[in-house]
Amino acid sequence: MRRTIGLSLTLILLGIAIGACNKGTPTLTTKGGGSGGLMPYCAPEDLQIPVMVTPADGENIEIAGLTFHWVYNTTDCIPEEFEIQVSQSPTFDSYSGATLDVGEEHWSPPVGLLSATVYYWRMRGTVMAGPGPWSPTWAFYTGPTCESASLLAPEAVFPTGYMFIYDAPSFQWTYPDSSCVPEGYHLQASASEDFSTHALDLSLATPSKLAVPTVEFENCGVYHWRVAATAGGTDGAYSAANTFSVNAGASCTQECTADQLIALQPMSPAHYANVGTAPTEGLVPGLLQWWYPMPCFPEGFGVHLSTMPDFSGPSLGGGVSPVTMTGGNWTPAEPLEPATQYWWEVFAGIGTTFGPTSPRRSFFTGPVCEVAADSLPPTLVEPLDGAIVDTLHPDLHHTAGGGSCIPDGYAVYLGTDSDFAGEDPYSSFNLAFTTFIPDSLDDCTKYYWRVAPILDGAELPASEVWSFAVRTGPSCPMSGQLNGKAIRDALPVRPRA
């Protein structure tokens, strides 16, 4: 409910009487909505920043009786309300708080705070037409504080391989011990990996785990940063060093050196996205896109695109667009197969020197199954029917089947009996993954498997049943019963996706 500062009934009547006697006295008006009372409401652009008093920035507070206090320096107008936010995140991704009448200057949270926790708070004035600017963010914490002998290394959160183009460098980290709070932190950044010189050497007197230093980093530079917790004037162990770079306005033009060939960041398509049928009907320019977080130009990029998650199949050809400062993109050389799961990765290179590959990403091509009649039984690919595999974690790979569509997911049946009637699936998933890696299988054992599509929670007609045998050693007691031979080398266990 909105409340305004108003006059008592007596004063209102007195004001009416005075107004009747002196018709030249102007009446109060409002700028932000509502009845003005003693002072008009501000327009949003005239709202002042509230002056926060307690808890002070960096203060160690007692949970019992915690009260937030502030003052508002009025000029010729006032806000209608105050908005206050309290969060464990310096970016206020989630928060608790309150909306308070303009006459209030104190607030106590209705729910108790956690011990050994850093909190952040901020506030602003608001009117019906909109809010004013936020106050600075202050940090406070609940005890106990950490002893210097027990300090642990913080864990870096941001930046990790990030390039700052339009914003000033900022740093964020977490502290792994939830039983206490450090008194502060020691933040360092350097152009050298051994931190023999410092572009930033900042002691932070509060336990805030976010820092936005005012230091100007040299443009087009690559930097390493780390942070240590402090207590009693003593630094604990530093976090692992992470890198960032500065490329103000994307203005850097130098070529990359070999040590600047780092892993790229895939951007599009999103992991497990369905790109529809357009890439199956023609060439989609820039189908694959990535970000290169270094202030330099590599000589080129290389792309692996395959229907096999380990890229053991042929890598599909394509062209890479001209290298840009922030990355690149790739266009297939020919249309892709419909209703297919693809995997891709990308890397940067200079001559014959190549950097590490990006994280592996996957996407699907359409069409998507709309009704059960659209779906056909999947086609099993490997292990081949009757094959012997030499790993306890074989990849079971299938496709949607020619002329079919992408369902909601698949149910995988796997067992030592070829008759799956009445059995529950070995595993099922709500994404149309076409490769499945089972838990450790028994050696010297023959298995049968099949795959059924899932649409709207119902299983559709399954694939045919294939078999394979597991034999990791040179022979098995049952080796005379196995036919065929191993078709592939053992592969490392990978996520089922």
Image (cartoon, rainbow, N blue to C red):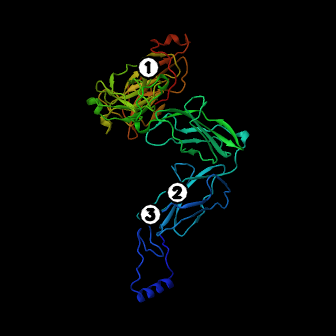
Name the residue nearer the viewer: 60 or 274: 60
Name the residue nearer the viewer: 180 or 258: 258
Q: Which mark is residue 135?
A: 2
* Residue assigned mark 3: 46
- Relative image position of residue 372 (x, y in whole percent): 32, 37
Quarter of the view holding residue 316: top left
Question: Position of 205 compared to 271: left or right?
Answer: right
Q: Amino acid at mark 1?
A: Pro
**Which numbered disc, 3 or 2, marks the residue closer to the eye?**
3
**Which numbered disc, 2 or 1, marks the residue closer to the eye?**
2
User: Is residue 1 among what the camera can see?
Assistant: no
Q: Which mark is residue 383?
A: 1
Q: CA distance from mark 2 to mark 1?
A: 63 Å
User: Is residue 102 among what the camera can see?
Assistant: yes
Q: Is residue 29 above or below residue 219?
A: below
Q: Residue at x 60, y 47 (%)?
A: 208
- Relative image position of residue 64 (x, y in whole percent): 67, 59
Q: CA distance from mark 3 to mark 1?
A: 71 Å
Q: Are marks 3 and 2 in contact (CB under 8 Å)?
A: no
* N-term-proximal mark, 2 vs 1: 2
Quarter of the view holding residue 413: top left
Q: Residues within 10 Å of mark 3 (few under 14, many from 20)?
A: some
Q: Secondary structure at mark 1?
A: loop
Q: Secondary structure at mark 3?
A: helix
Q: Amino acid at mark 2?
A: Ser
